[in-house]
Amino acid sequence: MQFSLFSATLASLFLSIFSLSAQVEKTKKINFDIIPRPTKIIHQGEVLQWESDQLNIIYDQELYDQADHIITFFNERGITITSRSKQTLYLSLKKNEGNKESYVLYIKKDSIVIKANYPTGISHGIATLQQLVLLNKNQDKIKLPIASIIDEPRFPHRGLLLDCARHFFDKKTILKYIDLLAFYKMNTLHWHLTEDQGWRIEINKYPKLNSVAASRIEQTGEIYKGIYTQEDIQEIVRYGQTKNITIIPEIELPGHSQAAIAAYPDFSCTGEEVSVANDWGVFKEIYCAGNEQVFKFLEDVLLEVIDLFPSKYVHIGGDEVPKIRWKNCKKCQKRILENNLDGEHELQSYFISRIQKFLNANNREIIGWDEILEGGVSEQTIIQSWRGVKHAMKALESGNSVIMSPTSHAYLDYDLKSIDLKKIYLFDPIPSGSKPEYHKQILGGECNIWTEHVPDEKTLDSKVFPRIMGMAEALWSKGDKNYEKFNSRIQSHYNILDEFEINYGEEHIPILYKTLFDNNSLYLQLIPGGENLTIAYKRDISNANMIIYDSPILIDDNCKIIAQAYKNKRHFGEPIEIPLAKHKGLGKDVDYMTQFNEFYPANKNMALVDGELGTLDFRDGNWQGFFGKDVEIIMDLGTTTSDISQIITNYYQYSNSWIFLPKSIDIETSLDKTLWIKDNFTEVNPIQNPKSRKKEIAEIRIKAKNKFEARYLKIIIKNYGKVPEWHEAAGSDTWIFMDEIQVNHILEK
Ligand code: ACM
Ligand code: ZN
């Protein structure tokens, strides 16, 4: 019995859909809101109203799987497949050459024809037919247009990375996602199977991967366990084949491997026992690169992996590899010496290239995260670019093909403030400014759903939908983009997602906001994140009732505004908290001697003087990040001022994400930006508690020692230094995160 996405309970709705002869209606509107938008739709203007409960299907022998799926689809809607029907659906292959995924779909008065060069194209034609049927069902009838659709994708690689290691999703969920990918013409499930927090693929030769590495003890003391047996995997891979979804396994190495090391401690540099990680982050226990047993282990594992996965590609990870263990390991250092390697970066390259040679000898190619470029890779390696586009550009120049999944557009674990449907829809995998001769090396893209904060299927659905539909269209459809039209097609799909029982999330954040300045007054403007939204708000967490927002709110003191959006009188999204600061530096010019990091720009040059403070969510858009360096910023107050009594700056601390409080904060003052006075303020050294795993905000107040005159303030912030020894990512650079430079002329109460 094959799994099917479409609920049989709905079958009764669809009884009597096809009649003995199709009636042609000219008046009823047909819905063509297919996602992704096809290359060409030629509509003959007529609409068929099929009113039969029978359909004949004729298909080429090689198309058994595709026929089986469409038969199931119609059966579940009460249609009997019988050769006695006057209506026939033809599935036919043309020539097994040309574009692998193109198809044509003809809907005529007595037949529907799907033709393609390859079975994959037939699958896409079926997805289009299914969408037309579902978009045009009308109580117990189906209308179809007399039309021709000619279609092919813009990019050959269109995928979803599903992290089943941080959280485990059962076989049923994986099969459902294969259906959904096929329905939206994606063609790859990138299956992330091994991590610090769990190993999820049964390997016969190493039973402790099952008995030890697949379980973790949560901080609550509960055991969290999950593994796919080889039988499960065979079933999933086979099901993927019937839907023309390639499943690419990812076996992470040399990093993100603490779970395997918990099972087999000899494979780490120290040999010390560790537990399967029960926290999120990057961990320093990685495979020892000087130990031959490690390579034997990985080769054994990969042999079982390639037996299970026919995919030409195996993803070997390669991202986020702290090198501290290698630095201090005799075996690793010996390997570096013997192979004439230039330090640990080249040792990583040695590691990857050994695994690559092994896989190549077994007829497979590798895909790796863009870090693997660091020590050089062979030209056949496919690079999955995630850290912006600059690594992709480097890969293209080195002749490598690239899969684009930049954190800026493709990370579905990020919230809507960073990545909403519109942003994904407008994503162009071809980096602007890249040379046209490189474009054919850009294979396409993937959206990634990392599941640290996705504990269950409901949350998964809400993060993936509807945004993945934006990616599906960005990767498939050619030609000009129009978000309004796309969004209107999205609206048509919500009924379908309801029918599939998908717990989809929102398209965009409910509320945007910005501060406005008028002379010395500060206002907060609240902006609906989309159409038909009303916003209500109140000050602080009081019992006061919310009031409807209609114009910018005057902010006369530091406070917190709570705002909630409504659509059709119902809550739209969660309430948001906006902490604000009124101070003398608002809107002043700020000169960055140290540039903020491109991934955490917040409100760019205004970030530290916009009155907007950060919350405990360090991705809330108010925290500005500086990576691995000291920070120096000069603020111009515009005129010489004599009433500055204190400067308040907040810093974020979250050691899991390598964000630490600075070592020191000092302030110098100047009248002319040339002569700087050091002793109007005393340097402050924040009390460090780096081992805390909590997300915390430290407020640092620096009071003036004297009354003084100044026009310029220089804030000098010293970085914590490297991630400390005890930390999983020991030796890496650290972040400074700050939200505002509050220049306060009121002496604190
Ligand atoms: C990644 O997000 N670490 C590839
Ligand atoms: Zn080692």
Image (cartoon, helix red, strand yellow):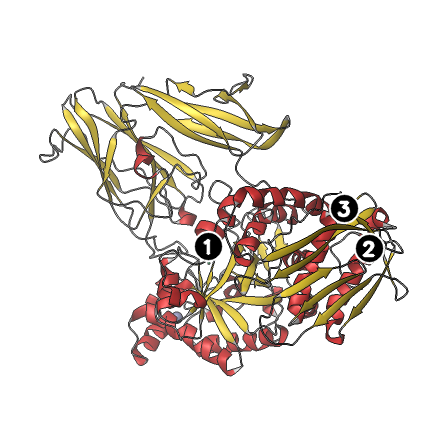
Left-right relation of 73 to 591: right
Is 69 drawn above or below residue 724 in the view shown? Answer: below
Respond yes or no on whether mark 3 lies under 8 Å from ligand 1: no
Rounded to the nearest angstrom, the CA distance separating label 3 from label 1 is: 39 Å
Amino acid beneath label 1: Asp
Which circle's residue, 2 or 1, is located before the other in the chain?
2
Instruction: Residue 142 in the image: state x and y as whole percent.
Output: 79, 49
Instruction: Residue 249 in the image: state x and y as whole percent.
Output: 57, 67
Residue toward you, 109 or 37? 109
Amino acid beneath label 3: Lys
Rounded to the nearest angstrom, the CA distance separating label 2 from label 3 is: 28 Å
Q: Which residue is mark 3?
A: 26
Instruction: Residue 98 in the image: state x and y as whole percent.
Output: 58, 73
Instruction: Residue 629 in the image: state x and y as whole percent.
Output: 26, 49
Respond yes or no on whether mark 1 lies under 8 Å from ligand 1: no
Is 84 drawn above or below residue 472 in the view shown? Answer: below
Q: Is residue 233 visible?
A: no
- Label 3 crowd (10 A; few <14 / some 14-19 / many >=20): few
- For label 1, the SS is loop
Which circle's residue, 3 or 1, is located before the other in the chain?
3
Q: Which residue is mark 2?
A: 76
Q: Nearer the viewer, mark 2 or mark 3?
A: 3
Q: Which residue is mark 1?
A: 428
Residue toward you, 70 or 276? 70
Which residue is depicted at the point 53% across and 71% down? 314
Left-right relation of 476 to 498: left
Determine the image quadrant of residue 701. top left
